[in-house]
Image: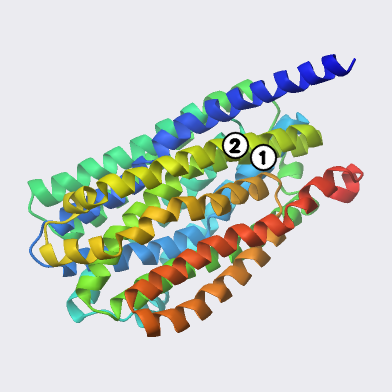
């Protein structure tokens, strides 16, 4: 009997390995196209004669990172609720989750456009940069802001496809959006001789084109899953309240995260255009790491959500352990690549010698970053799948406070090295705080279903 249980457990773990890789593999490859876009934008601007162009893209991009990532709950919350509905076999709720997400994306996207002037004023007031950098960033912002509804709708589509365990469709959407963006940016800047406006228009067109493709991609799984559009379910007060509560917690969590990135960029800007540009180059490495490792976090979201929907604690543990093992393996690969080829990658991103030298000086922080960051990325995926927004919120608030205190102390003493050390401490704190909250997820599965909800 014991041998049969052991054999069954081993077979279950092998099946989980397969599911994790089936989900994570395509997502890792498609996710890498996202920071590739930022890298291409940086490279295109980095081969113009003035580092202010890199700084302009960096400042403009961080504004949209702040705004869009603040609404990242549209992707993360949709994934968690979709995965749980899939695990519970509730086809009507799968449709309702999608409808609620689209409605919220339309409202928020329209608000961003309507409030673009005060949003821009607040953003530029908070970031100190040279006059030329700010002028270029204003141009970038004024163009890209019109893509807000499409960008947020894409979050919902991606979240729903990931929750449905449809990595192939998610890959198609992500690769299409970023490949089109890269092609248009190169055409406008290299082909037509535009500057920062070419990069911004490339992104704007790609966002709206991808929103149209996303609608097409969800039609097939919608037809296959069955169910019906039930207005009463879509507008169910209890479901909406739960969605808004979780989404608000994720919103606060994400706001803290993008605040840390904005703080890093803003503090670098106070040290001059060359430091700002060097840090912008290095942030491309961090984004490659994050999006690459997010493939395993996304797999954890879908599979943890399914396990929670089925209320299967053993399946939850298998997913957590196996997805984290694979993430650690890939994190080690990123660190090795940055160690061996980091300076060559910097040279591809910019031909400005001062920026190359500056980025290379602080490259060691990027080499160790994957091994420090992997824990927070993976735990984010686990908590999103379990829709444990409050714990994510509280952990991120604590981590942001730690980052700001560390930055104030370390930058004063160590300059830009202190800034990167504080950021490394921030990434470590994110993992530690979430690890402390993890037992709550397992305890919830031991409670009656109504209590857990």
Residue placed under numbered mark 1 in the picture: 320
Relative depth, front residue between 317 and 421: 421
- Image mark for residue 323: 2
Q: Does dot 2 land on a helix, a strand or a loop?
A: helix
Picture quadrant where residue 419 is located: bottom left
Residue 11 on image: x %, y %: 71, 18
Residue 28 on image: x %, y %: 44, 36
Residue 20 on image: x %, y %: 58, 30
Residue 232 falls left or right of residue 77: right
* Marks 2,1: beta carbons within 8 A: yes
Relative depth, front residue between 196 and 255: 255
Residue 208 falls left or right of residue 104: left
Around disc 1, counting alpha carbons within 10 Å, would you say few (fewer than 14), some (14 to 19), or many (20 or more)? many
Relative depth, front residue between 28 and 329: 329
Residue 410 falls left or right of residue 24: left
**Mark 2 vs mark 1, CA separation in Å:** 6 Å
Residue at x-position 55% and y-position 71%: 400
Q: Does dot 1 land on a helix, a strand or a loop?
A: helix
Residue at x-position 40% and y-position 36%: 30
Query: Would you place residue 443 above or below residue 266 in this image?
Result: above
Residue at x-position 14% and y-position 59%: 195
Residue 144 on image: x %, y %: 32, 59
């Amino acid at each position: 009997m014991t041998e049969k249980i052991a054999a069954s457990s081993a077979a279950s773990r092998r099946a989980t390995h397969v599911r994790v890789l089936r989900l994570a593999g395509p997502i890792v490859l498609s996710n890498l196209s996202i920071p590739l876009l930022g890298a291409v934008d940086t490279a295109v601007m980095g081969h113009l004669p003035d580092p202010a162009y890199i700084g302009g893209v960096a400042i403009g991009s961080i504004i949209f990172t702040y705004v869009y990532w603040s609404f990242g709950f549209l992707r993360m919350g949709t994934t968690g609720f979709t995965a749980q509905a899939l695990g519970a076999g509730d086809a009507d709720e799968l449709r309702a989750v999608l409808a609620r997400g689209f409605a919220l994306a339309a409202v928020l996207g329209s608000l961003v456009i309507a409030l673009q002037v005060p949003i821009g004023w607040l953003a530029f007031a908070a970031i100190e940069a040279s006059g030329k950098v700010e002028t270029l960033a204003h141009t970038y912002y004024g163009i890209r802001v019109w893509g807000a509804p499409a960008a947020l709708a894409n979050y919902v589509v991606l979240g729903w496809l990931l929750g449905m365990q449809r990595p192939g469709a998610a890959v198609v959407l992500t690769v299409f959006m970023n490949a089109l963006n890269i092609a248009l940016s190169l055409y406008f800047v290299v082909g037509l001789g535009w500057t920062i406006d070419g990069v911004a228009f490339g992104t704007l067109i790609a966002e709206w084109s991808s929103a149209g493709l996303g609608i097409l991609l969800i039609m097939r799984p919608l037809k296959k899953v069955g169910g019906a559009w039930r207005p009463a379910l879509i507008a169910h007060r209890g479901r909406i309240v739960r969605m808004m509560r979780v989404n608000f917690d994720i919103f606060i969590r994400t706001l803290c995260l993008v605040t840390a990135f904005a703080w890093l960029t803003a503090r670098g800007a106070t040290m001059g255009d060359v430091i700002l540009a060097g840090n912008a180059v290095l942030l491309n490495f961090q984004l490659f790491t994050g999006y690459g490792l997010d493939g395993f976090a996304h797999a954890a979201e879908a599979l943890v959500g399914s396990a929670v929907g089925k209320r299967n604690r053993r399946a939850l543990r298998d997913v957590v352990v196996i997805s984290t093992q694979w993430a650690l393996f890939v994190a080690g690969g990123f660190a090795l690549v940055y160690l061996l080829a980091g300076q060559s990658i910097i040279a591809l991103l910019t031909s400005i010698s001062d920026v190359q030298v500056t980025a290379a000086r602080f490259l060691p922080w990027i080499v160790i970053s994957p091994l420090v960051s992997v824990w927070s990325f993976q735990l984010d995926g686990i908590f999103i799948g379990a829709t444990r927004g409050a714990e994510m919120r509280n952990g991120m608030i604590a981590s942001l406070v730690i980052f700001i205190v560390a930055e104030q102390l370390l930058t004063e003493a160590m300059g830009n090295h202190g800034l990167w050390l504080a950021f490394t401490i921030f990434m470590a704190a994110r993992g530690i705080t979430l690890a402390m909250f993890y037992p709550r997820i397992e305890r919830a599965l031991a409670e009656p279903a109504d209590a857990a909800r």
